[in-house]
């Protein structure tokens, strides 16, 4: 059975690597999905669902979910979702799984690009400092 949760801004709903307990439906507020390296992938709002990926692909969370604002969430338990997923048309299950795998890969690539950008920015700062030394 689904349960409602009221959470303040800044609350961690779950962390990357946690075992999935279900999915969440946002009734009100905003939730950030972050990589393990604390890079924000997306901000979700009312009417959106998150946390379902761990149920489709595997049991572990791939991202950290943190409330951006005060939130009201509905937790849909893992068993409820598994039951619905098992009774769904096999084609729908396959499509959902394929999209989930692609999303996880896109999130991984986005995180890698962010890390590469951070390295480039640090190198740029270092080079600018060296250039300033040569100008003197």
Image: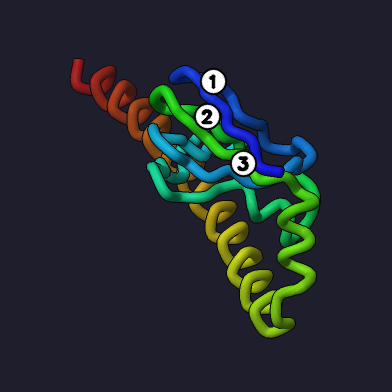
Residue 66 is situated, as x and y percent measured from the top left of the image, at: 52, 29
Mark toward the viewer: 3 or 2 = 2
Q: Residues within 10 Å of mark 3 (few under 14, many from 20)?
A: many
- Which residue was labeled with disc 2? 66
CB-based contact (under 8 Å), mark 2 and mark 1: yes
Task: Report the residue at 20% width, 15% height from top.
Answer: 136
Q: Secondary structure at mark 3?
A: loop
Q: Secondary structure at mark 1?
A: loop
Q: Residues within 10 Å of mark 2 (few under 14, many from 20)?
A: many
**Earlier sequence position, callout 2 versus callout 1:** 1
The image quarter containing residue 126 is: top left
Gap in angstroms between the C-alphas marked 3 and 2: 10 Å
* Vertical placement of residue 20 versus 90, above or below: above
* Vertical placement of residue 13 versus 54, above or below: above
Q: Residues within 10 Å of mark 1 (few under 14, many from 20)?
A: some
**Earlier sequence position, callout 1 versus callout 3:** 1
The image quarter containing residue 61 is: top right
- Which residue was labeled with disc 1? 11
Q: Residue furthest front?
A: 1
- Which residue was labeled with disc 3? 63
Task: Report the residue at 47% width, 41% height from top.
Answer: 26
How is colour applied across the structure in the image?
A: rainbow
The image quarter containing residue 16 is: top right
Gap in angstroms between the C-alphas marked 2 and 1: 6 Å
Question: Does residue 8 appear in the picture of this structure?
Answer: yes
Using residue 4 as the reference point, say whether residue 30 is left or right of it. left
Look at the image and tell me in which quarter the N terminus lies: top right
Question: Does residue 112 appear in the picture of this structure?
Answer: no
């Amino acid at each position: 059975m689904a349960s409602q949760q009221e959470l303040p801004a800044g609350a961690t709903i779950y962390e990357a690597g946690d075992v999935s307990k279900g999915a969440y439906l946002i009734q009100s507020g905003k939730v950030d999905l972050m990589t393990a390296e604390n890079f924000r992938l997306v901000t979700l709002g009312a009417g959106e669902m998150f946390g379902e990926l761990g149920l489709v692909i595997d049991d572990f969370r791939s991202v950290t979910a943190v409330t951006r604002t005060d939130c009201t969430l509905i937790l849909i338990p893992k068993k409820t979702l598994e039951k619905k997923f098992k009774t769904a048309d096999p084609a729908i299950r396959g499509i959902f799984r394929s999209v989930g795998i692609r999303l996880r890969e896109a999130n991984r690539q986005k995180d890698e690009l962010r890390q590469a950008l951070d390295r480039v920015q640090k190198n740029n700062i270092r080079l600018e400092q060296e250039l300033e030394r040569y100008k003197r």
